[in-house]
């Protein structure tokens, strides 16, 4: 059984290079791992910064890419070259090709993660597919919409999944706030992605540490 990593993951979402640079610089003071969201304006309505812009931004932080795109296979080589440690693709974008894409990601030396939208059930995850994955990320909002409302029923899916797969990294993304993060952690999520609850705060570092404490992750590996 692999060692799970319990962490709050700052989620970097922007379409401006200067904002990307600022958020990564801020993050360097309080974490060693961030998620960078990449949106193509097709799979979701919004468009974000490109892989090339990420590659041109120097940072000492390890990072993963959350691909909200129609054709994730086209991004894999450039993400590997840019230094991504893990790539997460949406099941809804790849479906039957999920296992092939996960294999392609791991062949580059990166870890592979799969993302499930709120309406997608865990029954789509076969044991063969899960064997290729480092993590499963559950969306608690519909992706691509700013300020979307947290969908609490997703916690039931996480709880069910965790019972069947205790050694898999389980993430959640969307709508995480100080008033629900403890409940989220109790559902079985060990990686909790947070955007505005960190970066929209006056002191992002203090906000991050407070969320980590509320989740019960402080001092955990």
Image (cartoon, rainbow, N blue to C red):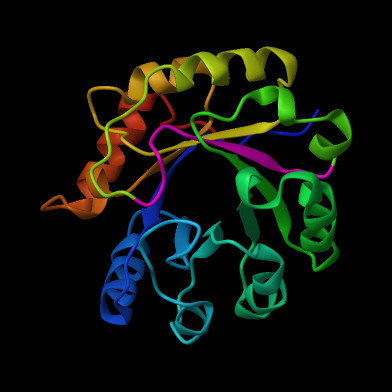
Q: Which residue does the image show at 80% across and 51% down from the upper left? A: 97
Residue farthest to the right, as pictured? 128
The answer to whether 171 appears left or right of 141 in the picture is right
- Residue 190, horizontal then vertical, whole percent: 53, 30
Magenta region: 132-144
- Residue 116, horizontal then vertical, whole percent: 58, 37
The answer to whether 50 appears left or right of 149 in the picture is right
Residue 188 figure quarter = top right
The answer, for residue 167, to whether it is visible in the render is no
In depth, the one of 92 and 54 nearer the eye is 92
How many labels sit on residues?
0
Q: Judge whether 33 appears above or below 123 on screen.
A: below
- Residue 196, horizontal then vertical, whole percent: 24, 48
- Reply yes or no: does residue 114 show up in magenta: no
Quadrant including the C terminus: top right
- Reply yes or no: does residue 136 show up in magenta: yes
The answer to whether 66 appears left or right of 18 in the picture is right
Q: Which residue does the image show at 22% across and 52% down from the upper left? A: 204
Q: Which residue does the image show at 33% across and 76% down from the upper left? A: 21
Q: Which residue does the image show at 44% across and 22% down from the upper left? A: 185
In depth, the one of 50 and 189 nearer the eye is 50
Residue 124 figure quarter = top right
Quadrant including the N terminus: top right
Q: Judge whether 96 appears above or below 126 on screen.
A: below
The answer, for residue 133, to whether it is visible in the render is yes
Residue 5 figure quarter = top right
| Magenta region, main secondary structure | loop
- Residue 11, horizontal then vertical, whole percent: 39, 53
């Amino acid at each position: 059984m692999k060692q799970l990593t319990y962490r709050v993951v700052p989620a970097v979402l922007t379409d401006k290079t200067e904002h990307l640079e600022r958020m990564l610089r801020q993050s360097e003071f309080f974490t060693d791992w961030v998620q960078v969201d990449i949106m193509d304006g097709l799979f979701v309505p919004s468009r974000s910064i490109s892989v090339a812009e990420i590659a041109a931004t120097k940072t000492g932080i390890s990072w993963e890419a959350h691909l909200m795109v129609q054709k994730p296979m086209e991004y894999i080589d450039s993400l590997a070259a840019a230094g991504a440690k893990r790539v997460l693709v949406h099941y809804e974008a790849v479906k039957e090709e999920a296992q092939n894409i996960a294999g392609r990601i791991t062949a580059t030396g990166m870890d592979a993660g799969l993302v499930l939208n709120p309406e997608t059930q865990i029954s789509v995850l076969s044991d063969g597919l899960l064997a290729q994955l480092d993590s499963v990320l559950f969306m608690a909002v519909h992706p691509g919409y700013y300020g979307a409302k947290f969908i609490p029923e997703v916690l039931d899916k996480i709880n069910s999944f965790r019972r069947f797969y205790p050694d898999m990294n389980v993430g959640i993304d969307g709508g995480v706030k100080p008033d629900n993060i403890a409940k989220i952690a109790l559902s079985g999520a060990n990686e909790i992605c947070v955007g505005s609850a960190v970066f929209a705060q006056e002191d992002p570092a203090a906000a991050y540490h407070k969320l980590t404490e509320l989740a019960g992750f402080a001092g955990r590996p």
